Image: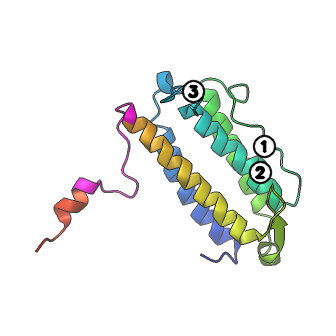
Amino acid sequence: MIVTDIRQFLEYWDRVRFRTRRVIACIPPEHLEWSFAKGRFTVGDLVRHLAGIERYMFVECVMQRPIRYPGHGRELASGYKQVLEYFDRLNGESVKLLRSLTPEDLQRKVATPDGTPITTWKWLRSMVEHEIHHRGQIYLYLAMLGVPTPPLYGLTEEQVLAHSQTG
């Protein structure tokens, strides 16, 4: 996917974010800080990480500013309602900043956190890939907890099989 128009990208990003937000809404509040092992991300850590990395790493790089990623700790947002508000608020800030990008901005090089130059639209594509990666982790965590989740695109695998023609 080559990005030449920020509005088209933001429409796509909104759909990706909607699917992530939908699975985040399935997290039982009592399991927000659950993890499968000591020292690993909790479900809440994943949500805080997605919020912070989008706003303070990906978008700051796009805007050609120093990254300010604050981590994923509970001091950023503690409690179910606060974590959801943090996630939504930072996404709103990101979208507002990204709306200012011109087609020329999308073609310019920016520096990743390790200093590697990358075309802005490719960096934005990496942000989407990063989101999808961690959304998959949230789905897995919820499956481990026995929490039902919505199918990603409308049908479950079993429903696709039922609609499939065999032979």
Residue at mark 1 to residue at mark 2: CA–CA distance: 6 Å
Q: Residues within 10 Å of mark 3 (few under 14, many from 20)?
A: some
* Residue at screen point 73% across, 25% down: 75
Per the image, the residue denoted by label 3 is 80
Left or right: where 12 falls relative to 142 = right
Residue at mark 2 to residue at mark 3: CA–CA distance: 24 Å
Per the image, the residue denoted by label 2 is 57
Examine the rendered structure and indicate whether residue 122 appears above or below residue 39: below
The amino acid type of the residue labelled 2 equals: Met
- Where disc 3 sits, the SS reads helix
The amino acid type of the residue labelled 1 equals: Tyr
Q: Position of residue 17 (x, y in %)?
A: 57, 53
Q: Residues within 10 Å of mark 1 (few under 14, many from 20)?
A: some
User: Along the line of sight, which residue is nearer the eye, 93 or 34?
Assistant: 34
Per the image, the residue denoted by label 1 is 69
Among the 4 quarters of the image, the one containing residue 118: bottom right
Residue at mark 1 to residue at mark 3: CA–CA distance: 21 Å
- Where disc 1 sits, the SS reads loop
User: Along the line of sight, which residue is nearer the eye, 35 or 21?
Assistant: 35
Of the two numbered discs 1 and 3 on the same chain, state the one appearing first in sequence. 1
Residues at discs 1 and 2 in contact (Cβ within 8 Å):
yes
Number of numbered discs? 3
* Highlighted magenta segment, given as a residue range: 144-158
